[in-house]
Amino acid sequence: MHDLLESIAIPATALLVSVILFGLFVLTAGTNPFSVMHSVYIGAFGSWFSWQNTLVGASPLMLTALCTALPARIGLINIGGEGALVIGGLCAAIIGIHLNGLAPWFVITSMLLTGILTGGLWIMAVGALKHYRNVNETISSLLLNYIGIAILNFLVIGPLHDPASMNKPSTYPIGTANMIGDIGSSSVHYGLVFGIAACLLLWFVMRRTTFGFAVDMVGGNLRAAQLSGLAVGKLILTTCFLAGATAGLAGTIEVAAVQGNANTSLNAGYGYAGILVAFLARHNPLAVIPVAILLGGIHASGGFLQRQYNLPDATTLVFQGIIFLVILASEAFYGRLPWFKPKAMSL
Amino acid sequence: MTDTSLGAAGIVIAVLGGAVRVGTPFLFVSLGECLTEKSGRINLGLEGNLVMGAMSGYAVAYLSGSAWLGVLAAGGTGLLLGLIHALLCQQNRVNDIAVGIAMMLFGTGLAFFLGKSFIQPVAPHLPALSLGSWSQSPVIRAALDINVLFITGALLAPAMAWFFRHARWGLLIRTVGESRDAALAMGIKVNRVRMLATMCGGFLAGIGGSYLSLYYPGSWNEGLSSGQGLMAVALVIFARWNPIYCLYASLLFGGAAALGPALQSVGITWGYYLFNAAPYVLTLGIMVATSSSTQRFASMPSELGKA
């Protein structure tokens, strides 16, 4: 009980502190911090319209956050979500273009499976390099981001280029029949359902199965896990595959629900924002859902702030950076604040 | 259009010239990272220092009219970001890799925010030494325009190697990086040494950023950095924590990054975007080839990677 209270109170206080710091920052830039904060709220959650924007932005964040959160549980800091998203989306688009004309359910299913598989293999490579060659996973996943983005740029500008796409180099469209639609009459696409489902499913896997327990054990003490006979390599590869699969799924949804083809917009920074979400959620798949919605909201309010105060769109980046730093600093307080400690028994 | 009469030799010269021109920011960030890592801490946030350095250097150079004041301001900004990194990292249970990622996000966001109004104005450039004025060929002349910052960096590398080997402070940093406990037992203030090393490392990365905005490519915009700061950590591993190897590694990376544009300048445009990935593929390949699952690098500071 005290643990739960602590794990809610500390991040909440940290968020409050970051709001104050951000307010001071906005103040030095010559804008009224209270009206800016109010506008962030209005732009993020103030109306059904803003809510829809927020949810659309939140769904890829849920998936890319899992790409960092799952490996973190096994003790790896993976920041390769951007690359896995790009590769998953690109491969899914290639399959979609080639199967265009067949039954839509078949095309969509094939695209989803392709995205999951390619994204999964992409991050699994990071895990394999770590396990077999002891290559630092943070660096290799970062390098793979750049390699993935270069492959995307090369293919959409070169061999797969659709001459009809003038301003934004793109592949041929996957066909409107093969697009993932919106939920009911809203403008929120079904990617949100995939995002929430993935978080719930992976929360269950990580918290309620022996596999999840083994993963936490490797993450907690590698040596002890090896000595107790756990197949560490297999666990690392599986976890990394699941992580990459979520980012690949995010890329597929971007292609199939938003863009309609693979283009350079796939590389929009969802992978990097997902790292922030994962750390804010302390690598708990269930906590990823509300945090992604919060971050999606802050992100969605960027355009609103720009129009209303003429603030640069990087304002929300600064806000995110401040939140990230304060949250990390707040790690130092876990287990050290007297009022979250269980009452000592009087002997 | 560049002179194409040199043919294959032109590509080689363009790549060599590019190695120096493109490699200079790599040199500064890798020397900065090397200094920080020698003290036993990883700063993954040098990308933030680099972009902030590029922005503040450009802004100060434009406002003051002096490119060198810009370089100094860029270093100062890097120093401050290094200070924030160090202050956060020395708290209990705070992971330096995660702080690095956060600093990267914060630094680039801040630079884009503050730099919005400096995208249009033109700031004074840093001077270059034209060592190729004897040649008629524009390719050779362009390749031999060596910036003063590169020369500074190239001299700094052996100086830093000497510093780590012989200077009292260099030995102090290495002690802290090899064993925190031994350093504590000797009465060294470990956190203070690491803070200074991170700040000086940040200073160098900031200067690397000012090279981007004040010399090559020589303007400020949001797509200025192509991840040079992120590559710093990989470069230092590749250079085996040796400042002199950092110089060679930066030139190699600069050359790899210059390959695409060099091929393009002689009319080979196929796969231009694929060649952009050359430095990253190279790094990954080298890391895979030189790592080992059974042993650590002998020259790696022992405190690195300890939680």
Image (cartoon, coloured by chain):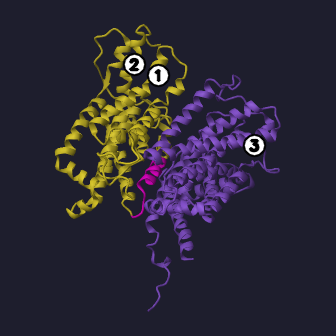
Q: Are marks 2 and 1 in contact (CB under 8 Å)?
A: yes
Separation of marks 2 and 1 at Cα, in angstroms: 9 Å
Q: Earlier in the sequence, mark 2 or mark 1?
A: 2
Q: Which mark is residue B14?
A: 2
Q: Nearer the viewer, mark 3 or mark 2?
A: 3
Q: Are marks 3 and 2 in contact (CB under 8 Å)?
A: no
Q: Which mark is residue B127?
A: none
Chain with colour yellow in the figure: B
Amino acid bearing label 2: Ala
Magenta span: chief secondary structure: helix
Q: Is residue B112 above or below residue A163?
A: below
Looking at the picture, tell me which residue is in the foreground, B56 or B303: B303
Instruction: Provide the chain ID for the residue under circle 3.
Output: A
Residue appearing at x 59%, y 57% in the figure: A37
Q: Nearer the viewer, mark 1 or mark 3?
A: 3
Q: The magenta stretch spans which residues?
A: B92-107
Left or right, residue B255 beside residue B275: left
Q: Residue furthest front?
A: A229
Residue occupied by mark 1: B261
Measured as percent of width and height from the top left, residue A21 is found at 48, 59
Instruction: Provide the chain ID for the residue under circle 2.
Output: B
Q: Is residue B106 magenta?
A: yes
Chain with colour purple in the figure: A
Residue occupied by mark 3: A109
